Amino acid sequence: MKRVTVKPSWVVENEEGSELGPELFAMLDALKRAGKLTDAAVKVGVSYRHAWNQINDWNTFFGLPLVTLERGKGASLTALGEKLLWAEQRFNARVGLQLESLASELNLEINRLVASAASSLRIHASHGFAVARLNDLLDAHSDVQLDLRYLGSVESLASLSRGECDLAGFHMPEGKLGARALDQYARWLHPDRQRLIHLVTRTQGLFVARGNPKRILGVADLVRPGVTFINRQKEAGTRLLFDQLLKDAKVDRAAIHGYQNEEFTHAAVAAYVASGMADAAFGVEPAAHQFRLDFVPLATERYFLLTSLLGLERAEVAKLVELLRSEAFQTIAATLPGYSAPLAGQVVTINEAFPELKDRPRLRIAQ
């Protein structure tokens, strides 16, 4: 059946009650990317004349120009145009995951109510650009309905332990950084009754403005005067990794201007940097490309899906594993900067993935 999608839609209204709809932001984005009104008009599917008239109407609506058109120099956004576009992008980055989760709940409920309801699979996962594409993968190649909800890595693992999902997505840095991250995850990992499914390998690093004008090359540069940072929330695996990088570099987090300011997704912190409100953020490479930022790679990590032995026997999980091993998923991974999927779909024991865990004392979890 067709899927329901929930998307935000901006309406701008002035004192007279006149309104501008979402086509405003589509045109502003197209102009910023193309730099020419002719190309932008083609991109949004309107005539050049219509686009020209729209711009004049918008200038009148705001009482200030949003776009500068110069013969021989193309089109560029004014400061107001840039601010409007940034506000829309930041809003979408902040609420997008919540709307995806809402759409997932609606689709699952619809499927439960129809006679031909498809089987469902519940995944609670740390946000990532590969896990976000699992909906597309399952829609195109199966009848499995995905209920995907985004939580931090630790929250996702805890959710699996409570039986609230079938698979929990989390990411683990490679090398000594991973050994420290394991301290955060160990209590939720049970080698005797759980298995790991490889998803992707990805790169995390610093988002900086195009051209890196402040020459931010590592976490030590974040404490320099005049550098502002935007952070991820405390529960995020990306925040855990960033804090570990600070510790290794002997950087005092209190000395980083903006360390206490938080956003909840890779896209949200990238939008913050793109707006000029921060000079740097930390996250995965596709978010930097999405907002046309430069990226300074700092760490490589593996992204896993954790499930129980009983979960692994479910037909829906088996279908997902099959698709992760397919060329279709390799094609998806190849479109994501900084991502690769050499082991996608491979099922391993926890001790095989994390041999150092065998020598650690188990922590009992209160039931």
Image (tube, helix red, strand yellow):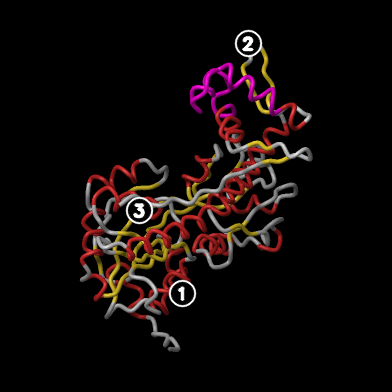
Residue type at mark 3? Asn
In magenta, the rendered stretch is 31-58
Q: Is residue 299 above or below residue 195?
A: above
Please state the horizontal and vertical placement of residue 310, each as a whole percent of the image.
24, 76
Residue type at mark 2? Gly
N-terminal of the pair, mark 1 or mark 2, is 2
Crowdedness of circle 1 by 10 Å Cα count: few (<14), some, many (20+)? few
Crowdedness of circle 2 by 10 Å Cα count: few (<14), some, many (20+)? few
Asked if the residues shown at circle 1 and circle 3 are in contact, with their CB atoms under 8 angstroms apart, the answer is: no
Residue type at mark 1? Asp
Lateral position of residue 161 relative to residue 194, left or right: right
Crowdedness of circle 3 by 10 Å Cα count: few (<14), some, many (20+)? some
Please state the horizontal and vertical placement of residue 255, each as a whole percent of the image.
71, 60
Lateral position of residue 175 relative to residue 268, left or right: left
Please state the horizontal and vertical placement of residue 358, each as a whole percent of the image.
32, 78
Q: For mark 2, give the secondary structure.
A: loop
SS assignment for the magenta stretch, majority: helix
N-terminal of the pair, mark 3 or mark 2, is 2
Residue at the spot 55% in from the left edge and 62% down from the top edge: 239
Q: Quadrant of residue 20?
A: top right
N-terminal of the pair, mark 1 or mark 3, is 3
Estimate the spatial distance between the alpha carbons at disc 3 and disc 2, rounded to whole Å.
44 Å
Estimate the spatial distance between the alpha carbons at disc 1 and disc 3, rounded to whole Å.
31 Å
Lateral position of residue 176 relative to residue 265, left or right: left
The residue beneath circle 3 is 135
